[in-house]
């Protein structure tokens, strides 16, 4: 018998991707999937891509979740703390929300509002030393999708002294599933197809998380909504401090990583190549005109940016092989 | 040690999907992947979604393929026969092309041109009695993507006497990967996005295959190119001969099938729900105004319509569980 | 001084397209644009593509509309009658809704619900004799977008005796703007991109309108939502009654029409070529296998399918050149 | 009788858009449209959106162009000089290619290769003093699409002393029509849909033009191919030198411009709102975390980025109203 897992918030996009990954996972047995307004619905009424899975969504309450060995929380930002507080200490938790990511309570309150719930182990296994921390943790705060994309690109270059942590400029475009499954006019297909639209320009709530994770001290980030369902492409530029080769630094940092691929020279990441996978693709160069470092990073916001990352952390927390149930390869075209 | 397999035509879209499926298959070991103009290239230069796979494409010749226990041919229509002729009889073959699908040589010559190469076991396991034939075959002609979509919708209704085989009208829209990976202006993103365009109206080469597989005797089929990379949606209508319920007929026909799902009443198939999977989704009704049967069928043209179907057949031919290495669930959104 | 016009329902997609066309019209002066929840908003907050137009939306009431010589009603189906009843007889009206299209009150009630409001002159100028009726009318019911697409393809073939009115099968795919600007989960970009999904299969509310306009007596129509913002592509098939050439019949019917183009032989309509225009593109053939007539029709659902058609009718009703302020040419790619 | 104009390179995307605009222009009479491999084809075989236009493409030679008062050259980069050299001095020319944009011959040779053809009046009327120069010129080099987008955003801020010309970072995404109408695998719909891909990272050939037009002295620009047919969205960031409000500076610079719109505070440009128009939308802010200036600029790469801009320049060169035949309003959704 395997490890018993549950998903809270199973009706959203990250929740659906979690169900898909868990259905194919050899060791995790799904014992509950909960939802709010969709409680009581058969899973295929909510996620038609899961036709063939016999599962009914239940209401999100402690009772239906406490039976699991490990719970994934895929709830809207700010709702995880209340659910987590009702679960026994013996139940491991991976939170896909932002609630427990930040160490600085003041920053939480400024960007998200409400009281800060606390700080859990930050769930990005490829950061130095972090894999062991995750293995030893019962509570893990999964990275945000933008933060995962940008941190994997930037953290090694700051750590190696190549990139100036005080001069970082990022423009990152996300597919629409990153905006969630809420019925808003600006997310309608009619509005999005054929369109690129920036949002929260000048003050995005993920900036504190990215600074905390990368060591950047000043960072301009402009997020853009792109006409595709999945994927994030981040262009990360920074003032170059020393003459090292940024590609070599990244290649060395991720040489043994199964999910982070520094592409062959001359190949640049693009989002479709990561779709449906848990991989992140990276490439770097030095700009001819400005001399700035440019790193481009691509991943699937629902994969390595959310559900895949969460399963990777859960594998580590459960003593399983880190790659179990996850795909290195994208579904393309 | 597993079963040794090879892919000829690995640089195309169906070839790339085969490589992805084989990389995750527990029993098939890929020993060769061949290409024409891309021979010598690393696989990630051709299929960036396979970053992390260490494989170089070789030239398509008998020597590099003969070492395998089973060969997948994913070549342009008309090129399979020459390659197949050079392979030892002991090597099993699944041909994803049209070369060996038709029983009627005259129809082959009219629609495809050139000499008819012969007829192999038709590889659609869900047709009555066909699974056993495939298991017993060393040579299997994989279904075409349109034919798979339409046959699964129509064959049981004709067999049960509900649908008039002499009065069938089909309109089927396909994603662009169905048109292959050739650099043509009409397949450019600028031309396709935001556009629906019919093609080969009035005389599509897949009609004889569909008639042969379904038992239809007169069939109008209009194919449409749709602005999406994957997926086929077929609307199949036929004059109704008897008063039976078409949904019940389909549900009975596929009750034990792992990959063919008749959706709950009121739910209609859509392509995205099958993307990346080997599933086909079906629903049927009787039109209020005309009394015609309407069946809608959706699948992934590269999955159940090509590479997934081929792996399913190869599993059967190799004595493996039919579902091995294949996903029931789609990657959505 | 020009002719004073007003738009009720200016916040929707058809309303926005009307405002765009009217802003470029040499003789129509927009004196009011009304909305419901968006009343009081500047037009660019609702339609950012109209940046540069100085206009504030007002509330939809008789007072703000009565000042016009001609009013366009672009309201949800069922809401036009109430507004129309409050307008003076001297104000001409073009209704883009379904309220006044059907002659048969029973059919209205069955498909739309509620009481039938009445029947106005049906606004498809290219039907025989209809142009003169529209010129003489003060109240015109604009065609539905599906009805316009299908009627232009089918009506001449039934009238000429080529097509069997009792055996018509249509599959028509529409871009998402046809579904309106309401915030529904199934219309989200994440759900629609990469997807084709049929809806209202077997009983679409536009069937009675299409039968009334074309003379068909039995018609199966399956509508499909396509991943593009604009455009309808209809594949219309019918049993062939006589040996005439369907393309010649259509070419003769529309020889003098500025907006209906029967394409050169071998060219098939596609939606992008009509985007932003008031044109409809047509092509026809006889199916090799079944002998059925196949006509493909493409137009812009917001252009010739809604706002453009409405302006064309308004031009006729106002004694202006029929093509004034309308573009024959599409915006592509 | 109007002004006689001709288009060389009419088979490409910019050429097609020119034909569309010229067909609706009240004063320009198209006397020739030339092409290379498509010479002899009817225009609708090449541009089906122009159905209804009776025009046959001729071969690109001086004879067929010399009959015009003004010639638009929409040829691949590097081919304009040879054609221009064969035209009489009395024929005015607007070149949409890059050949005559740069003042620095060495930069031309480094980025484009081949000999530098010379320098013509740079065709961006909204730059200070430039409108008068264009009016007085017989030879005008139209801006590049990226350069137009970025220059309109950045030039006033450098001129006003707000933006540090030595510290500019740009990420700009373009729709696929910007890559031209050549049949390349990487531009296939299957590759592009659902995908964002950067290209020419670290050394884009438009950087010298942008620096020349804006006054920037160091500029990092990363271009990204986006899954949409039209539109450019540029995120332009720069170190802030003084405390002025960037939005106010832009609003003052463009207060009287018909085609450049600084949006209301809080509204950010998005590409779809400019599609089919000659407008550019702008918004600016100061980044909370880094203090950098952020300007977002959107336009239609075929409109204000190419054909629209060219017509605007041609209007000025011909003594016509600058806005004649051009639309301020976008076609959306």
Image (tube, coloured by chain):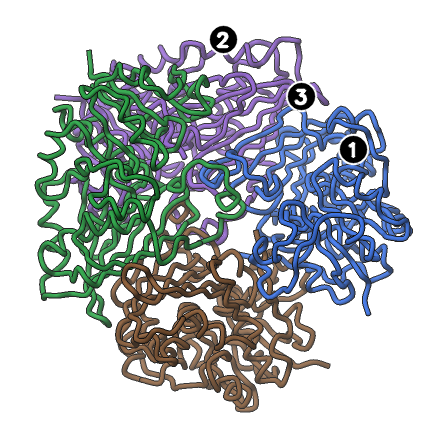
Chain colours: A blue, B brown, C green, D purple
Q: Quadrant of residue B116?
A: bottom left
Q: Around disc 3, counting alpha carbons within 10 Å, would you say few (fewer than 14), some (14 to 19), or many (20 or more)?
A: many
Tell me if I can see residue D96 in this picture. no
The residue indicated by pointer 1 is: A242
Chain letter of the residue carrying label 2 = D
- SS at circle 1: loop
Relative image position of residue B152 (x, y in whole percent): 44, 72
Q: Quadrant of residue C241?
A: bottom left
Chain letter of the residue carrying label 1 = A
Relative image position of residue A20 (x, y in whole percent): 65, 59
The foreground one among B73 and C289 is C289
Which residue shows up at 37% across the image and 35% down it?
C76
- The CA distance from mark 3 to mark 2 is 21 Å
Q: Are marks 1 and 3 on the same chain?
A: no
- The CA distance from mark 2 to mark 1 is 41 Å
- The CA distance from mark 1 to mark 3 is 26 Å
Q: Around disc 1, counting alpha carbons within 10 Å, would you say few (fewer than 14), some (14 to 19), or many (20 or more)?
A: few
Residue A175, relative to residue A90: is it above or below? above
Which quadrant holds the N terminus of chain A? bottom right
The residue indicated by pointer 2 is: D252
The residue indicated by pointer 3 is: D287
Q: Are marks 2 and 1 on the same chain?
A: no
Relative image position of residue A309 (x, y in whole percent): 74, 50
């Amino acid at each position: 018998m395997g490890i018993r897992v549950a998903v809270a918030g199973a009706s959203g996009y990250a929740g659906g991707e979690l169900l898909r990954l868990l259905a194919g996972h050899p060791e995790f047995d799904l014992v509950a999937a909960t939802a709010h307004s969709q409680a009581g619905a058969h899973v295929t009424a909510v996620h038609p891509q899961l036709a063939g899975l016999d599962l009914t969504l239940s209401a999100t309450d402690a009772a239906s979740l406490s039976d699991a060995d490990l719970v994934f929380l895929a709830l809207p930002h700010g709702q995880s703390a209340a659910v987590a507080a009702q679960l026994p200490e013996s139940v491991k938790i991976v939170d896909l929300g932002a609630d427990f990511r930040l160490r600085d309570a003041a920053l939480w309150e400024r960007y998200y509002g409400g009281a800060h719930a606390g700080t859990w182990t930050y769930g990005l296994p490829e950061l130095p030393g972090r894999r062991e921390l995750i293995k030893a943790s019962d509570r893990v705060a999964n990275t945000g999708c933008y933060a995962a994309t940008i941190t994997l690109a930037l953290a090694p270059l700051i750590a190696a002294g190549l990139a100036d942590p005080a001069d970082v400029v990022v423009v990152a475009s996300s597919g629409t599933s990153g905006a969630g499954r809420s019925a808003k006019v600006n997310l309608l297909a009619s509005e999005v197809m054929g369109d690129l639209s920036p949002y929260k320009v000048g003050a995005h709530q993920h900036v504190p998380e990215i600074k905390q994770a990368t060591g950047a001290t000043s960072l301009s980030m402009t997020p853009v909504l792109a006409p595709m369902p999945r994927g994030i492409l981040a262009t990360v530029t920074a003032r170059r401090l020393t003459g090292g080769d940024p590609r070599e630094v990244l290649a060395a940092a991720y040489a043994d990583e199964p999910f982070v691929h520094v592409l062959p020279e001359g190949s640049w990441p693009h989002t479709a190549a990561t779709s449906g996978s848990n991989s992140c693709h990276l490439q770097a160069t030095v700009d001819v005109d400005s001399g700035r470092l440019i790193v481009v990073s691509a991943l699937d916001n629902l994969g390595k940016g959310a559900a895949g990352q969460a399963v990777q952390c859960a594998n580590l927390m459960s003593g399983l092989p880190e790659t179990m149930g996850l795909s290195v390869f994208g579904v393309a075209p």
